[in-house]
Amino acid sequence: MTTYIIRRVIQSMLVLVMVTMIVFLVMRLLPGDPIYMLITEDDLIQSSEEKIAALRHEFGLDKPIPVQYINWFSAAVCGDLGVSIIHRGKVAKEIIGRLPITLHIGLLAFIISIVVGIPLGVVSAVRRGRWLDTGVTLLANLGITIPVFWLGILMIYFFALYLGILPVQGYTSPFEDFWMSTRKIIMPVFCLSVFPIASAARQTRSSMLEIMRQDYIRTAWAKGLRERLIIVRHALKNALIPVVTLKGLMFRNIIGGSVLVETVFNIPGMGRLAVDGVISHDYAIVQGIVLLIATVVLVVNLVVDLSYGWLDPRIRYG
Amino acid sequence: MKGKWFSVGSIGCLVLLIVALLLVGGYPAHSQDKPQYGGILRVVEGAGPRGCIGWPANAVGNDALGMKPCIEYLVNQDNMNKILPCLATDWKVARDRKSITFTLRKGVKFHDGSDFNAEVARFNLQAVKDAKASGTASWTSVEVVDDYTVRINLSEYNNNLLARLSGSPGAMVSKEAVEKNGIEWAKLNPVGTGPFKFVSFQRDVVAKYTRNENYWDKGKPYLDGVELHFIKDPMTQQAVMRAGEAEVLGIGLGKMAADMKALGFKIISAPSGTVSLLPDSKNADSPFGNKKVREAVEYAIDREAIVKGKGYGFLKAAYQLPPSNSMAYDPNFKGRQYDPEKAKKLLTETGYPNGFATKIIPMSFDVDRDVMVALQSYLGEVGIKVDLDFVDYGRYSEYRRKGWHNALLCQPIAVFPNYNQTLDFYFSAKSPDFPSLARPAGFDELIQKSISTVEAKKRNIQNVLEKMFDETMVIPINEVGRGYAVQNYVHDTGHLEWGSWTNWTPDRAWMSK
């Protein structure tokens, strides 16, 4: 087990280096000079070539790309993610300022998707062919297909404009004003959790149906075990492996996948920061966020892999 | 007799009816009413400051938005280029035009309690000069004359200089606060003399200000505070206004303005410039090097149809470079009206009977894509095959700076209250802008003559514009502008009345709610 973890950590480090290298290169191959994105129309006309060259030097953009990468990576290892070209602020500080907001909303949506989605899938599988199954399947299909920004707009019109019970937009920290914070995140959390709930319900249902057909489940029924025991202890635990894989894949969306919701509800989170960074060619911001997302994905993948052993003791790590 | 009685009676009834209607409040409150105190004014803008709202020397673009409620300038400038006092009560241009001397307002204190005086003014002006801020190139030095008099010495005078001091170069912040806390601190903690004190700033989210009880203009401001909210998504912006979560919303003119008007909001609007095509007329092998080809392009475009389709009643077709609110605008000027047959004839005369292929490179964020498609279509009708090359701001800036080939750049040419500033900014020989755009012989001399008078003169400006028209230097398409949707209970915000769109009057604004 320990050997397996060490091997996976080393592999993850290599993947991390490759991911940062690819992103670093791709960002620099995009057409458009970040220095020209930085200077305003006023500066464009007033700035001499020397001033533009000085700006390029300030951000280290006058060096060869391999040197730029080595400089960035060696600083990143020490926790310095560089300076934003557009905002001129420390990237790490920018990310630290936005991460709690994204985690607050994203984690809540993630937890809700587990708490609601998996039981819905189980109930749907157990009551297969009945009205409850039909209802859950219909809702799950809707949840998978509904565009999140459209849902957000509908919610704003209904809850904020028509009923007037929720604020349209914005984010307030729960430590500043818990009640206002809760009112403000209801709609974004709901929007963010719809797709994960639907996908978790569908995956759980399909997995459960497969397990329920297994001989050992039939034996359990024949032995006269209680339904709850059969479903929870014998069926669900075995059905969870693909669901855990799915949830592991979706965990990364907490950080990188909330951009539409953050835009519609005007939430200053990581998604918006990342997209604005790409649009404005803010290399340091994009690299910092990709590094964070890649790290999260690699850690979650490791945790997911390790959880298989707990869910199915037949799985061994070599 | 009976008829006369009837007439007097009906007039009397009408008067009584009007009085009754007025008494029951059947008319909207407006700026003639007595201002009321209280309330927080929430202004929504699509984009906010990047992060320097307290150190004018490094402020760029939207940073001025964050300064305005709490920092004041030496002078103010209205849309018709009238320079008005603010922290300077008077100014004099030296006879030799080698200096401008400012008399400063007495009894003004910064929000940290320190005094505003000539030394503080010198400190601020010197900082923008050292930072080589826009408009300071001709400042040779800044000196204190006495406690309340400061002088800017000049290498050469131009009549844009005072106007520049109604923006960031003329902004005054507390010297004491900057020296005590450092410039990095000052960038995010503005300490000015303005009607509101800075409270907090969260980039891309909100900037908050509270009433300055010790404001030098006694009795003002009327509001308890100001909040600037930054919301990108137009649908969310509209919902915020409809839900009553904001009082003022910055909008573009066109559909959004029409929608907000239909929802019952007051709309304040003003042209901010003219969308224009800029040909690469300097390149000898470009078709646009030929004046007749440029004229053909102008005749080929039906500007009235474009603004009818996309303007929603807010935009006008442009046949001259200055928009209709500019001091330089000539209401009698006809320009080159839509005439595709004449366009085809001109193309035939110049050796392009079947047209040619070219491209339009629009400044994507600032021009309407549908208008670009319309241009493509109109030029196609006379045989000019156009590709549209939508590039990001950075790439577009590179074209502006380094040049373009066999193409037309397309962007708004901004209007400054002193139109000389527009001409100098974009087209003078000193400007590195648009290197592929040919400037005809004698053109720069006309600009220099126009900007060197003590005050701007319309005749001089029009001489420059006439030369531009004769040479078809640029091809104006339509006016563009900014607008504000305002709740009906909000008054006297002064938006779009003070030169730059970032300038407004938070000190005078009030709410009747």
Image (cartoon, helix red, strand yellow):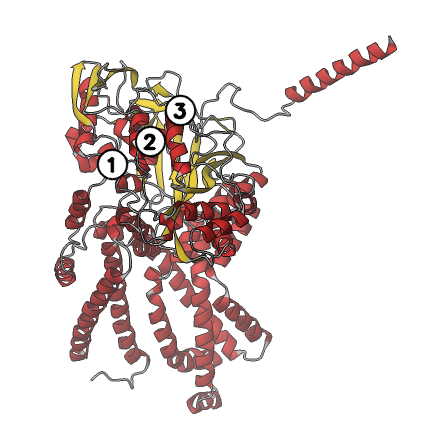
Q: Is mark 3 on a helix, strand or loop?
A: helix
Give the mark nearest the N terminus, 1 or 3: 1
Q: Where is residue A150 in the image (x, y as percent from the top left)?
A: 50, 58
- Mark 2 to mark 3 CA distance (whole Å): 15 Å
Q: Mark 1 lies on which chain?
A: B
Which quarter of the rendered picture does the N terminus of chain A lie within? bottom left
Q: What element carries label 1?
A: loop
Q: In this view, does B84 lie to the left or right of A147?
A: left
Give the mark nearest the N terminus, 1 or 2: 2
Q: Is residue B263 left or right of residue A258?
A: right
Residue under numbered circle 2: B421
From the image, state whether disc 1 or disc 3 is nearer to you.
Answer: 3
Q: Where is residue A105 in the image (x, y as percent from the top left)?
A: 37, 56
Q: Where is residue A159 in the image (x, y as percent from the top left)?
A: 53, 50
- Mark 1 to mark 3 CA distance (whole Å): 22 Å
Residue under numbered circle 3: B459
Query: Residue pushed farthest top?
Result: B1
Checking the image for residue B430, the label placed there is 1
Q: Where is residue B387 in the image (x, y as percent from the top left)?
A: 42, 58
Q: Mark 2 lies on which chain?
A: B
Q: Disc 2 marks which amino acid?
A: Gln
Q: Disc 3 marks which amino acid?
A: Arg
Give the mark nearest the N terminus, 2 or 3: 2
